[in-house]
Amino acid sequence: MPAAGRSGRSLHQIRREAPDFVLALAAAALAYGVMSLLMTATPVTMHLHHG
């Protein structure tokens, strides 16, 4: 049971209990970066080709 005023586990506790947490965090960060790149590059490319 969590202490009064707090809910859930701390990030340190989650990282310690779930060894794949760091891998999942890295994969999410990489995917977010790729998504941002594609969502920026696509309209720019369309503008350059179809002017």
Image (cartoon, helix red, strand yellow):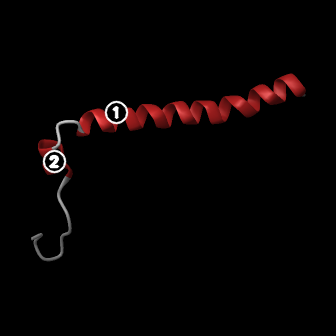
The quarter of the displayed image where residue 15 is located: top left
Residue that mark 2 sits on: 12
Position of residue 21 measured from the top left corner of the image (x, y, whole percent): 24, 40
Crowd tier of the residue under label 1, counting other residues whose Cα lies within 10 Å: few below 14, some 14–19, many 20 or above: few
Q: Secondary structure at mark 1?
A: helix
The quadrant of the picture occupied by the C terminus is top right
Taking the spot 80% from the left edge, 29% from the top edge, the residue there is 46
Position of residue 36 measured from the top left corner of the image (x, y, whole percent): 57, 36
Q: Which mark is residue 45?
A: none
Taking the spot 18% from the left edge, 49% from the top edge, the residue there is 14
Position of residue 23 measured from the top left corner of the image (x, y, whole percent): 28, 32
Taking the spot 9% from the left edge, 71% from the top edge, the residue there is 1
Residue that mark 1 sits on: 26
Residue type at the position of mark 1: Ala
Q: Quick check: 8 left or right of 31?
A: left
Q: Secondary structure at mark 2?
A: helix
Position of residue 33 measured from the top left corner of the image (x, y, whole percent): 50, 33
Question: Tag 1 or tag 2, which sits nearer the N-term?
Answer: 2
Farthest-out residue, bottom: 4
Residue type at the position of mark 2: His
Q: Is residue 23 or residue 3 the one in the foreground? A: 23
Q: Is residue 37 or residue 28 the one in the foreground? A: 28
Crowd tier of the residue under label 2, counting other residues whose Cα lies within 10 Å: few below 14, some 14–19, many 20 or above: few
In the rendered view, tell whether residue 49 sits above or below residue 3. Answer: above
Farthest-out residue, right: 51
